[in-house]
Image (cartoon, rainbow, N blue to C red):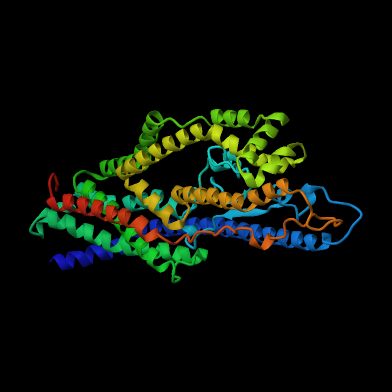
Amino acid sequence: MTRALFKLELAMLLKARFTWVIGALLFAALCWGAINGQANADAQQATVERVKVHAAARLAKQQADVARYNRPADTVLPYWQDPSDAAGYMRYGLAAYAVKPPSPLAGIAIGQSRLLPFYIKTDLDYVAPPAAAFDFINPRILSLGDFDLSFVLVYVLPLALIAIGASRLAAERDSGALRLMAAQLPSFRQLVMLKFSVAAAVCVPLTLAATVLALVVAGTPCWSMQTAGTMLLLGAALAGFTLFWVALTALVASRIGVVGSYLRLVSLWIGFTFFVPAAGALFIGMAYPAPSPLLYLDDLRRANDFKPAERDALFAAMARADPAYAAAAERVGKVSYATKQIAVQQAVERQVAQRAEAAARQNDAASGKAAALRWLSPAMVFDTLLQQAAGSGVERHKRFLERTGDYTDELRAFFWPRALAEAANPGNACPGCAGRMNFTDHDKIPRFEADRPMDGVAGAVGGAVGYLWVLACAVMLMLWSGRRMKV
């Protein structure tokens, strides 16, 4: 009897026109979201390639100019136009970029990638956030949100599962057919589990298949060698998330009628998806108020407000501290502005360091609490998991900014000693040439090494996958307990 009822329920669910209408709309939304996400990833990849081409072309031109200026000439180039002058080149000629290329799975979730920079033109006066603020897109467009695959899976999929499953038990209870069906089985709990099993057997594989097919339609390389493991984890997470909502739908529908089921399930969806995140954001905002960027920028402005005499004094003190550059202190009036900025930049960073460190500590504390509160909402956990897998989350961006700061330090370690040596020994390597030829090591300039976006993804999302399955199993146990079920 159980097997016959299972086959009957499966046939009824698959033959229902409503099931296929909801499924078709969900698949269309998945395809639309996947195409939007992949288009954003493709545009970012094209921009990264243009940045690389631009930097390489500019470096090649500068090297060609060095060869052209390495001959006697009637005029001498100003230092800021001379690619063979270390001080002039590091401030006015350097074209070095830090880039964060999109992940192969970036089409899954746009995440923070449209709000945060994915390439930064580094210079030796680079100041780390919060001073480094970036506006790429009109805020009114950003306020509308991004319709991508993650949006459909996190926000639309639960509604589709509720629409399909909520009426399976509740409608039959209201019509009286549920009593007749329950009489054919040893217990009403067995009937509920049978209907839940049918819904899970249909919804979970169809959701997985529709998601993969949508990614294929969008052109996302989801089954390459480097993405296959992550895709399996994402499939497990999606199955757990789907099973959670199917079980929750069965749990609610086994207790009340159709109207009450829909109202309660939609209320739960609103709570998990909107209320918990909003309440968490309010709590974080009150407990850990964001540092004012205006105060930081005011400190930065005051720190940069140097008079020429003060700049000279700073540079002279710095030069005298190192015997190799002490000679530059004696001719400080003839030292280039670009070289003096070395001392100024160090002084500026010392003055704003305290506020910057306080802001960093505040942001880290808020981020830690937000990460803990995220576990209260399966929607937030699933959304964060998708962003981590797509390489478009906040954590990867924080690592990108840290590596950009490290790269800036590498450039400083390369250029500053050369510029200070020029200031201490101002002679030209090519007397009578248009260029000074004091700097010809363009090929040795440090290059930024982009990260590998798929590295460490499995470890980052593994805990969230387990959480979704534990949550789904907990709801299934509540359903199996059969308490408060009404025929």
In this rendering, the answer to whether 421 lies above or below 59 is above
Depth check: 331 or 407 in front?
Answer: 331
- Residue at figure coordinates x 64%, y 54% from the top left: 96
Q: Residue 10 at what x, y percent from top left? A: 26, 64
Q: In the image, is residue 468 above or below residue 332? A: below
Q: How many numbered callouts?
A: 0
214, above or below 353, in the image: below
> Which of these two is toward me, 193 or 167?
193
Residue 207, visible in the rendered structure: no
Which residue lies most toward the right here? 74
Which residue is depicted at the point 56% across and 37% down? Answer: 349
In the picture, measured across the screen, residue 439 lies left or right of residue 347, that is right
Residue most extreme to the bottom: 225
- 56 and 459: which is toward the camera: 56
Spot occupied by residue 121 in the image (x, y as percentages of width and height): 63, 50
Quadrant for residue 209, please give it: bottom left
Percent from the top left, x then y, of residue 240?
29, 57
Q: Is residue 452 visible?
A: yes
Place of residue 6 in the rendered image (x, y in percent of width and height, measured from the top left): 20, 65
Q: Which residue lies furthest to the left in this view?
A: 186
In the figure, is residue 210 to the left or right of 307?
left
453 on left or right of 463: right
Tell me which residue sits at (71%, 60%) in the image: 59
User: In the drawing, does residue 67 fall left or right of residue 16?
Assistant: right
Q: Which of 79 and 373 is in front in this view?
A: 79
Quadrant containing the N terminus is bottom left
